[in-house]
Image (spheres, rainbow, N blue to C red):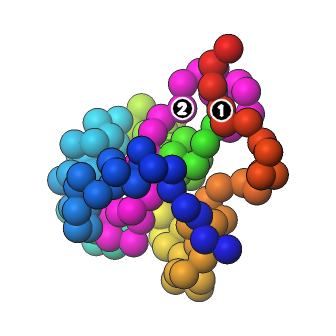
Amino acid sequence: MQIRLTRDLEEQRRATPGAMTVDAFLAQFPEVPRDLRDEPVMAEFVRAFSAQLAVAQKPSPCVARAGGGDAEHHFYTRLVNDLAIYGIGLAKRERTLQRLERLLAEYRAQPATFACTLVPRQGPEAPRAACR
């Protein structure tokens, strides 16, 4: 199974060609603390997930309440949320780095299909997430 991005997300990803850098990641997500910038695990994390991070979007409260959102919202929740929680002081640095390591270990075990595990399965007729 392969996750296909919608046309607008694919165009957005193509507008920023190449792998994302740690600095670009930190610029895109200001909620991630800068003290993680020089951590080797951070560089590996950004390199491994640059395609998903390039399109990740923080879900709005109504999308979160509605049950999840689209792929870009799930990418944010699974990849950026722990870092943002550390950024506001609700998690410890070492535990956050351990979570990144664990996520990378899962990715290394199945790199070709790992992105599929970041998004819950939905039927083909499932509506797109939106505020009502």
Question: Residue 69: percent from the left, percent from the top?
Answer: 64, 37
Q: Residue at x 59, y 64 (%)?
A: 3
Task: Please provide the residue range marked out in magenta.
Answer: 46-68
For disc 1, the marked residue is: 129
Amino acid type at mark 2: Pro
Q: How many marks?
A: 2
- Give the left or right position of residue 53, taking residue 38 as reference: right
Q: Residues within 10 Å of mark 2 (few under 14, many from 20)?
A: some
Label 1 or label 2, whichever comes before in sequence order: 2
Question: Residue 29: percent from the left, percent from the top?
Answer: 32, 40
Amino acid type at mark 1: Ala
- Give the left or right position of residue 42, taking residue 72 as reference: left
The answer to whether residue 4 is seen in the rendering is yes
Q: Residue at x 73, y 36 (%)?
A: 127
The answer to if 11 sits in the magenta stretch is no
Do the residues under discs 1 and 2 have CB atoms within 8 angstroms? Answer: yes
Q: Residues within 10 Å of mark 1 (few under 14, many from 20)?
A: some
- Give the left or right position of residue 31, taking residue 112 as reference: left
C-alpha gap between disc 1 and disc 2: 10 Å
Label 1 or label 2, whichever lies nearer to me, is: 1
Q: Magenta region's main secondary structure?
A: helix
Circle on res. 59 = 2
Q: Quadrant of the N terminus?
A: bottom right
Depth check, front residue: 79 or 4: 4
Q: Residue at x 35, y 63 (%)?
A: 50
The answer to whether residue 91 is seen in the rendering is no
Question: Residue 13: percent from the left, percent from the top?
Answer: 33, 55
SS label for mark 1: loop
Q: Quadrant of the C terminus?
A: top right
